[in-house]
Amino acid sequence: MISAPKPKPRASAVQAQGRCTCEAVRFEIDAPAVWAWHDHGDTSRRATGGAYATYVGSWRSRFRWLEGEEHLIRYEDPVARTTRSFCGRCGTPVLYERARSPKMVNIPRGLFTSRTGREPRYHMNLGERADWTWAGEPLGPLKGYPGVMIERARRRPRTLTPDDIL
Ligand SMILES: [Zn+2]
C-alpha cells in the first residue's frame, strides 16, 4: 500500500499563499516572511522583464509546494551560483535561490494573493539600477488616452564631465 507523503508541519498559524499566472503551481509560506526586498540587479531584471524584481524571502523550512511542482523548469547559473525556477506552462518566475543563502528561498512578491507579514523596504544591487526605473516622479493624465499617465518631469542622473572635476 502506498501512502501519500506527509506534508511538512506548519510552523505558524498564518500562511501566505501564492500561485503562478496559469495557477498550475501553488505554494505557501508560514507568515510572517523573513523579509522582502527590491532587487535592482541585472540578472533579476532579465529574469522577470521588469525594471526590478520584488522578492519575499522565506526560510526554506517554512516554504511548501501545494500543487504543480512537476511543472517547474529550473535554470542554474553556475557563475552567480543561483537557481531560478519558472512555471513550464505559463513562464511565471516562481523561485529564486542563492547558494550564499541556502536556507532561504525568494519568491516574487506579485505571486502572493495575500499579505506576507513583511513590507518590501530593502533595496539590493542599486548600482545596477536601470536608469529608466520609475522612481515616483509626478504623473499626469495623457490627453486623449484615458487611463494612460505620463511623467511630467523626468529626473535623470547627471553624468559628470571633466569640467565638474577640474
Ligand atoms: Zn503557470
Image (spheres, helix red, strand yellow):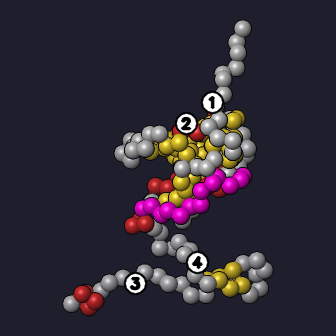
Q: Is residue 46 visible?
A: no
Instruction: Please tell me whether mark 1 or mark 3 is closer to you in this view.
Output: 1
Q: Secondary structure at mark 3?
A: loop
Which residue is disc 1 drawn over?
Answer: 8
Q: Mark 1 and mark 3: span between their CA atoms?
A: 52 Å
Q: Earlier in the sequence, mark 2 or mark 3?
A: 2
Q: Is residue 62 above or below residue 118?
A: above
State if disc 3 and disc 1 touch (CB < 8 Å).
no
Q: Secondary structure at mark 1?
A: loop
Please count the marks in the image.
4
Q: Circle 3: is it few (<14), some (14-19), or many (20+) Cα within 10 Å?
A: few
Magenta segment boundaries in residue numbering: 113-125
Disc 4 marks a residue whose amino acid type is Gly
Q: Mark 2 and mark 4: span between their CA atoms?
A: 36 Å
Report if residue 115 lies within the magenta region. Answer: yes
Q: Is residue 31 visible?
A: yes
When asked about the image quadrant of residue 54, the answer is bottom right
Q: Mark 3 and mark 4: span between their CA atoms?
A: 18 Å
State if disc 2 and disc 1 touch (CB < 8 Å).
yes
Percent x, y of residue 149? 69, 80
Please tell me which residue lies in front, 58 or 9: 9
